[in-house]
Amino acid sequence: MEFLSIAFWKSLALKYGVYALALNAFIEAIFFPIPPDVLLLTLSITNPKGAFLYAAVATLFSALGGVVGYYVGYFGGKPLAERFFGKEKVAKVHRLYESYESLIILLAGFTPLPYKLFTVTSGVLFASLKKLFIFSLIGRGSRFFAEAAIIYFFGKEVQEFVIRNINILSLVGGALLLLAFLIYRRYRKGVLP
């Protein structure tokens, strides 16, 4: 299926530019397997001056797609989960998810984990849609703007490195975000000065 090939989406990016990126970012947050990074990097390498615009488009449309993914989970997944596992178990998992939902969404948006799983799961567990949107903007934005900045400041010299190591780079970035979040929570609880 050509529609699911990275080469197909790269050619769409080169032909339709920011519109293909917006579409890819939107549907990837709901169900699509090809992450917007492929198009973002393709467009940014082709036009480094537009890298931050491309990052902004990918961030916004990914977060908007996350809202649709949330409703897919809320209206489709929640009734199924309650039917198979019972309302009490779903409510118990919801309480656990609720304790860490901001961190979960933030890390899901930044790391190479399948983002769509977390948008739909947020709906299934009737998590906060507001938090999903805000932390999607922060997590996805951090990832996409970091990629754009690397291409903007270093250009084609780092192209192969970034493409080959994007998952490792985002995992390291995700670990740093996790550390910052944990420090912040401890600070808020008064454990740190």
Image: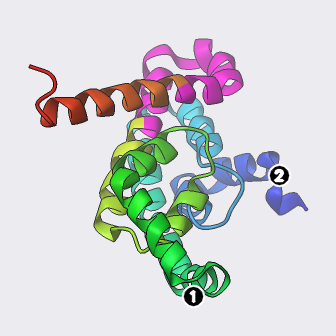
Residue at point 34%, 69% (across, down)? 129
Residue marked by disc 1 = 79
Q: Nearer the viewer, residue 88 or 180?
A: 88
Crowdedness of circle 2 by 10 Å Cα count: few (<14), some, many (20+)? few
Give the quarter of the figure containing the C terminus.
top left
Numbered badge on residue 138:
none
Q: Does the segment drawn in magenta span residue 125?
A: no
Quadrant hosting residue 51: top left
Q: Indicate the amino acid at tag 1.
A: Pro
> Where residue 181 sits in the image (x, y, percent)?
31, 34
Q: Is residue 92 above or below residue 16?
A: below
Q: Nearer the viewer, residue 71 or 54?
A: 71
Q: Magenta region's main secondary structure?
A: helix
Residue 52 can be seen, yes or no = yes
Crowdedness of circle 1 by 10 Å Cα count: few (<14), some, many (20+)? some
Q: Indicate which label's residue lies in the foreground, 2 or 1.
A: 1
Mark 2 vs mark 1: which is more N-terminal?
2
> Where residue 64 sits in the image (x, y, percent)?
42, 66
Q: Which residues are magenta?
A: 143-171
